[in-house]
Amino acid sequence: MTPTTNRIRHVMITALVIVVLALVIAVPLVMPAAAQDGERISRPGEYRGYSEPIYDDWVRISQYVPVRDGTRLAVDIFRPAVDGQPVDDPLPVLWTHHRYHRATEMDNGELFTILTQAPELETALYHGYVIGVVDVRGGGASFGTRRGEFTREETQDAYDITEWFAVQPWCDGNIGMFGLSYLAITQYLAASTQPPHLKAIMPMMALFDLYSFVYPGGVFADNYVENWGTRTILLDKIKPAAPVDDDTDGALLQAARAEHRDNANIYLLAQERPFRDSNPVSDSEYSFSSVSPSSYIDAINASGVAVYTVGGWYDMFPRDAVTWFNNLTVPQKLILTPWSHNGSGGFDMMAEHLRWFDYWLKGIDNGIMDEPPVYYSVIGASDDESGGPNDGSGAVWYAADEWPLPEETPTPMYLHAGPSGSVESVNDGLLSLERPSTPGEDASSMDVYSVDYTTTTGTTTRWVDGYGGGFGYPDMRSNDEKGLTFTTPPLEQAMQLTGHPVAHLWITASVEDIDVFVYVEEVAPDGTSTYLTEGVLKASHRALQEPPFDTMELPFHRGNAADVSPLPEGEPVELVFDLLPISVVFDAGNRLRFTITGADADNYLTEPCDPAPTLTVYRSAEYPSHVVLPVIPAD
């Protein structure tokens, strides 16, 4: 079995697969008369008969809207039209806070708008929604300067724009937000300001905790931060956005872009803040705690805004999606797709968005809130295994009432000496349900690994796809051969993992600190090794703390400066850390592999030492290194 995900879109500007969004309505739920005439279907990914397209045309206008401090933000407004004229009927507004230019003038003179990028949004217009797209302050054609990302000023802008939309004569007072990635994160932040007219949101692929993303396990995700930061600098300072309609000579655009020159360098900001509580003098108000979406859970819950969170198993933020779900108390749903950050396909997400919008914005009782709140895909499952339809993406869909799944059976699999005969790695160890019995001091109960700094998961990873660089993991054998591997014998029957693997590694090292990367892979009979998920921890960040939010009982490493502790010389310590969640079926005859390395050269910053340090991984009765897998029983 090879997991199927979509490799779509290679540039961040065009990588925002923006489907349509959500909003809550303050009127009784009603059934539209048109739905009485045909077949009505409302279930995940399929929707008809409850609402119909009533328009077949639209018009666009663009203008500046001032927010509370006088900063003018560039706004595109798309309205349903008849005979080329916008309709007079007040309609709900769906809008997005855009980080990557709401519109761009192409070299051929044509205008590249959000509808060029995501033509499926026309469906929302035809169903009677107004669409708004707003350049963030300091970006696109908007005025202002950016101190960083997700600042309080930007979040307050979302409140002001929401309420501006609400009082326009073509708006019925019901506002929703939509978007992917940055455009998803801003939805949570907007909800935290509690605008009276913001009713529902549908964020796709959004982070929850900023520090855990920039420094997962304390290791700097430098490739992502540097490339994303470089691309935003290009957009803010070099590549111009389209001017608004009244700016016929481009003077306002030029004046706005002049204010972008002082935008903060995100890569430098991240470098200056290696710990969660880093607080450089250069900008004492800008810290991970002050701008992370995770800081606003209570305010979001107080808002009452309905939330439909969309995640992807190969996205950067699958853990974030389920963490949002477990920390929100507002009306909510969660869908976990088999996609990467910019992937799609095999599931009609537009239909799902319309179900959400129609319920919360138009009061159409289509039953979406009567369904189980969680809908998730299982990669590689067959129709017979699930009893449900395979959607063509290599995944089958299931419903659940909660996450993690209550039927999950945490199953420890222990590291043993080999050989497995499946790979020519440094050790070729075995992975087994049997707990080790060899004494801890026995040399045969450990693997000594000299860190190879060339190990990598490649240049088209989930992280690279996050900034528009493409997606598609290579055969992991070339990486496995440079690391420590522990592989099961061929499975006698299919096995499903759905949830969060957790690594428990007993280690020592020849240095005071070392980065530890782990992977779960599926190995086919021909030896091909398919990447499934990963985890990382800097050994000095191994201390566990009580989390400030619900982590589903997963290990939490706070990452404050005071939490850092060097490795004791010669004394084994346990590293406990989770891998990104996954849902996959391993075919019978395939193997499960657990790989350990000391670097991911193309994706993380691991400072090299000369000579390369040694990492000793113990697998004895006293120090039983293992990985706990979220096994779903066959029945």
Image (tube, rainbow, N blue to C red):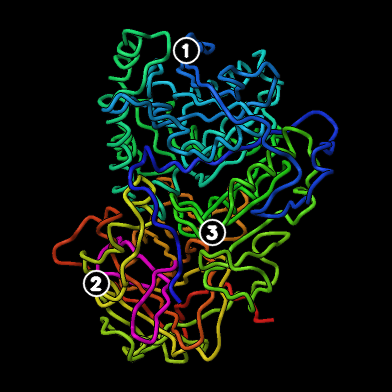
> Do we see residue 153 in this rendering?
yes
The quarter holding residue 383 reads: bottom right
Looking at the rendered structure, which numbered label has been put on residue 64?
Answer: 1
Q: Earlier in the sequence, mark 1 or mark 3?
A: 1
Q: Is residue 259 above or below residue 565?
A: above
> Is 531 part of what is drawn in magenta?
yes
Near mark 1 (Cα within 10 A), the count class, few <14, some 14-19 or many ≥20, is many
Residue shown at 47%/13% (left/top)? 63
Amino acid type of disc 1? Tyr
Q: Is residue 357 above or below residue 506?
A: above
| Disc 3 element | loop
Task: Give the Cα distance between marks 3 and 2.
Answer: 45 Å
Nearest the eye: 301 or 495: 495
Q: Which residue carries the number 3 mark?
A: 346
Q: Main secondary structure of the magenta part?
A: strand
Task: Give the Cα distance between marks 2 and 1.
Answer: 59 Å
Residue segment shown in magenta: 507-532
Amino acid type of disc 3? Gly
The quarter holding residue 58 reads: top right
**Residue 51 screen position, x and y as percent:** 73, 39
Residue shown at 27%/53% (left/top)? 605
Amino acid type of disc 2? Thr
Looking at the rendered structure, which numbered label has been put on residue 614?
Answer: 2
Camera-nearest label, 2 or 1: 1
Q: Earlier in the sequence, mark 3 or mark 2?
A: 3
| Disc 1 element | strand
